[in-house]
Amino acid sequence: MPVKTKRRTKAGPRDSYLVLIHRFPLRAIRNDRELDVAIALVNELLDRPVLDEGEDDYLDVLGNLVEDYEESVHPIEPASDAVILGSLLTDRGQTQLQVAAATGIANSTLSNVLHGKRQLTRDHIRRLAKHFKVDPAVFHG
């Protein structure tokens, strides 16, 4: 969760923190309705140009509560090699043939990966990460 670095000094941080606590108490989120309210409040705080210390502290904890709920109730499955490679091709505006030529990975291998018939090897990941200038961890979902 991004944290604001600029701080506003007009209202005391304790006052702003308590105001936010009254709006939405900091406790485990129990359902999707509470999640929606929490996300709206997170977005409201992130849209502010600056936050005082109390708002910043509140945002930090609320962001953790949102993340905990989403991970436990709405987990996101790791992306497959096909999805990751396809996204990189699309995002970079490159074709499968261009990447095959640039990395030395056979076009048929890339095709099989993109169709979910094959997984990337460590060597493929190393070459693709170097080509796309991304951390190899990108390929681990």
Image (spheres, grey):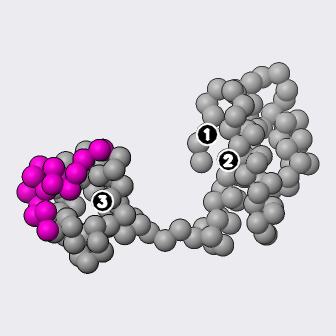
Residue at figure coordinates x 88%, y 43% from the top left: 18
Q: Quadrant of residue 8?
A: top right
**What is the spatial separation of the Cα atoms under label 2 and label 1, in whole angstroms?**
7 Å
Tag shown at residue 85: 3
Residue at figure coordinates x 29%, y 48% from the top left: 134
Q: Mark 1 sits on what residue?
A: 3
**What is the spatial separation of the Cα atoms under label 1 and label 3, in whole angstroms?**
31 Å
Asked whether the residues under the numbered discs 1 and 3 touch, taking CB atoms below 8 Å apart as contact, a structural biologist would say: no
Q: Is residue 118 above or below residue 63?
A: below
The mark nearer the N terminus, 2 or 1, is 1
The mark nearer the N terminus, 3 or 2, is 2
The magenta region covers: 92-108
- Quick one: label 1, few (<14), some, or many (20+) residues within 10 Å? few
Q: Position of residue 135 (x, y in %)?
A: 30, 51
Tag shown at residue 60: 2
Residue at figure coordinates x 10%, y 64% from the top left: 106
Q: Quadrant of residue 114?
A: bottom left
Asked whether the residues under the numbered discs 2 and 1 touch, taking CB atoms below 8 Å apart as contact, a structural biologist would say: yes
- Quick one: label 2, few (<14), some, or many (20+) residues within 10 Å? some
